[in-house]
Image (cartoon, helix red, strand yellow):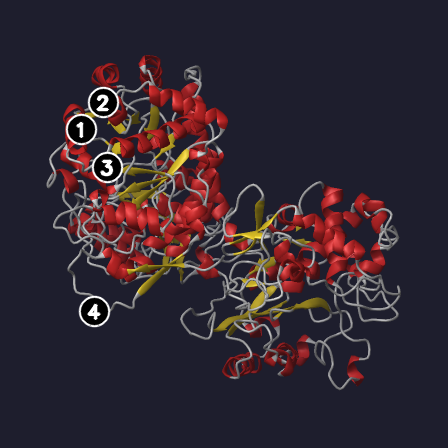
Amino acid sequence: MFINNRLQINRLLPSGTIIRCFSLFILLSSSSAVFAQRFLEITPASKHWADSALKKLSRRQKIAQLMVIRMSEKRGNGVAFYEDEVSKYLRKYNIGSICLFQGTSQQQAGVVNRLQLKAKTPLLVCVDGETGVGMRFSDVTPFPDQLTIGAVQDASIAYRVGQAIGAQCRRIGIQVDYAPVVDINNNPANPVINFRSFGEDKYKVALFGSSIMKGMQDEGIMACAKHFPGHGDVAVDSHLDLPVINKSVLQLDSLELYPFRQLVKDGVGSVMVAHLYIPSIDSTHNRATSLSPRNVSWLLRDQLGFRGLTFTDALEMKGVSKFYPQGEAAVQSLIAGNDMLCLPGDVKGSIRKVRKAIRKDKLSWKGIDEKVYRVLLAKYNLGLGVKKAIDTAALTIDLNTDVLKVKKEVYENAITLLSSVSPSIMPLAKGKKIAYVGVGIEKQNHFAESLQQQFGADCYYFSYSADSTVADSLLNRIRSGYDAVIVGLHQYRKYPATNFGISSAAVSLVRAIGLQDNAISFIFGNPYAISNFGNAKNLVACYEDDSLMHDVAVSLLQGNITAKGKLPVSVPGAFHYGSGIIYNSYFPAAQPGAVGLDEKELNRIDDVALNAIRQGATPGCVVLVAKDGKVAFQRAYGHMNYDNKEPVTVESVYDLASVTKISATTVSIMKLYEQGKLDLEKSLGDYLPWVGGTNKAPLKLKDILLHQAGLVSFIPFYRETLDATGKPKPGFYKSAPDEVYSIRVAENMYMRKDWTDTLYKRILQSKLGPQGKYIYSDNDFIFLGKIVEQVTGMSLDQYARTTFYEPLHMKSTGFRPLEHLPLNNIAPTEKEKYFRLQQIRGDVHDPGAAMFGGIAGHAGLFSNAYDLAQLYQLLLNGGELNGVRLFKKETIDYFTAYHSEISRRGLGFDKPEKDNDKREEPYPSLSVSPQTFGHTGFTGICVWVDPKYNLVYIFMSNRVCPDGENTRLLKMNVRSEIQEVIYKSIKKEAK
């Protein structure tokens, strides 16, 4: 059921080609082949409408239904609309689709309304709007470029961009948007994709592309993943010629195809096929991938399992038209397996040549009917079954409504601090003497105006036409007499030709100023241009050059925001992908000595961690130590897995396992208790009606928090769904989600949603032991998580996120990390041999939590070390961090104190053994104070807070990777040994 298909390379090669390595394969997921495309869903209503519409079409009209016609283009300083020509095609051929380009929103709405009235079959209205309709409409502000969005670390923001674009399209009667671009821009010199891509990392491109797509499609707009099979590694613009990609199919599969495969699995409605020449796919001379059956029918349809609509890239582009005259390109596109012919040019000639191809048996009317029927189904499911005119009242206002709000959120999360030799330069203090050098401009822009108003800056301007003499003079003027010099690089080109249009004199000037310790350089535009300025002492990537980004840059200078972005691409000779300095001024780094720690002693952590890795206790780990409110030690060791391919970084995200119990569930219970919404002396039955009438109803919340309510330790829920051989029983799981099987438990494995009720039933039916006996139980916290949901009316993940993680800017912390983080940011856990039968990565390791959909009170939370440390620093501070107060100190003191006569537990929290100083194996380590509180996690996690020493210690590892039975980390006492090193490093005066 979960076995992958094999894609054999020799099937891709022309007949007669000698295969030297016939044993090579590409593994492609079979789940995509069965994903139901909701836009092509056949229901009684859609079938009736499509059947009726198809019967009314003549043969010429059927062919015309597969054509997308251009509506306008730039002409001189104006815009030419082709309404008369399109109206003629409507009358004569009943064409199927139009694509909107230049013009105002009112012009577009008027044209669409008039044409839809004339259309016998409703027109499918498309737009090439990667940044929303503002990419084309002159009176609508565009959303950020995809490369800007790629600098953001939270995919939920990309989803909101997609939602907003979808709402725009719906408002103006558009059904299909040719977005997102999911090409991986791994060539900095790419002349056509470049800033249109999310970046160079395949995982991030896939995640953010899927997020944009889901946002659009949740608004009822069909997204279109482009440009298949990947346009990111070219040096030729396909608008001008046919780019050649000399990569093997294995290379393509490992990189370029990855985002497309993910979006197909996630249900993208359509795919646009690129004009590329890739000999390893089709060696027919000068045959573009858009015209290749091996690319469209075999690779995209058969191997990736795509079931939606395919659009060719524009057939008027030279990458095709240079080798296939108009009409012939349309024929070859349909033979290849495409559904829609984008901008075919000669409509009459194309129809004539398609009919001729049918007569010669190169095509068939049956095949044409199938394509047309798919298009008609899409039209109906996209709302065209009922004609509805676009309301032009306040149209332009409506289209712009959400743009600035969403755009600002992107900008504030994208702006990237790349170097900070002089961290004291920000925030800028008022009263200091400030100079601003605007490069690429000749007069004041919004950034200069803001700097003048906020800081009284003296402004200087240097255009790209100015020479080195002017540069030298300017340099002499600002070299002395200023406390800070701000450089802004503006108005350079988006594409890399001729160094983005930046003059050599400008490069020299910015470089010279950037070497000053008191200078900070802001690069407003394509980050690849930063290759000119990698030596700048203080450097910020701003990605775009508009007044809103100028405002965000000023906010950064004022200290109102911190830089949160990371470079989505590598900048040659300067910075690697993922570069970016992220820190909170309220939880800063500090040298160990500044907080009373002996650095030499603290560095012994390296020895313990590296020895653990050498001994196979864990493939890698992260250690964080914070003292006195500052991060004094944060280091990453080893790799994500024992293959040593992916190094661990301090930002690696780990499955927290049972640390979820305190980091999500307990803190939520604390908040509700503090608000008077929970009484710990009350019972489960008081809060969960569905436990009524069972022996679980009388159990007190306080006893549950202490693990002494009598609940069994855990229930292996998954066993009931497996047969005697350990394989899933029929009817429990599917390899792709649908309305019935919607609970993701792992990659390509979805449980039927009604089984969740059975899981709760099994807990209610479980044996109840004697109360007052300590039994560490996951079931205790499954119940507590449901109480949080019952009281708040929110899911546990939503409540924890909005109440704790968002106010503390804990970007990486959350459940279901695959929804907002790239896969390669997340450490893998077990290569499971008993249930899910796969390497677990990004899905929760705990099988029970997985069967609850990845959100449960006992497990499911993921985080990096720094973000998690902020929550515990807040608890250490008595409930406040950076002016954000989430708890009263007395609440924290109450929950973190000892509360049991029979165990070491606090309320929810774990604590040291009460006789720690007498134990042969003290827990968690010998030197901790009795005030200490925290928890450990099965996957190799711990967090401990010691109020006596004002100390936070976090250890993160994936010791269960790949073998969940690997206990070396525990036997070697790695976590405890590191903790003891920390205590020994505390200087006597600090104690």
Q: Which residue is mark 1?
A: 355
- The reply to whether discs 2 and 3 touch (Cβ–Cβ < 8 Å) is no
| Element assignment for label 3 | helix
In the drawing, does residue 325 fall left or right of residue 56?
left
**Residue 588 placement (x, y as % from top left):** 55, 61
The circle on residue 20 is 4
The circle on residue 334 is 3
| Element assignment for label 4 | loop
- Amino acid type indicated by mark 2: Arg
In this orientation, which residue lies closer to the viewer: 151 or 170?
Answer: 170
- Give the Cα separation between the discs numbered 2 and 1: 8 Å
- Give the Cα separation between the discs numbered 2 and 3: 15 Å
- The reply to whether discs 3 and 4 touch (Cβ–Cβ < 8 Å) is no
For marks 3 and 1, give the one nearer the viewer: 1
Q: Is residue 430 visible?
A: no
Residue count near mark 4 (Cα–Cα under 10 Å), binned few <14, some 14–19, many ≥20: few
- Amino acid type indicated by mark 4: Arg
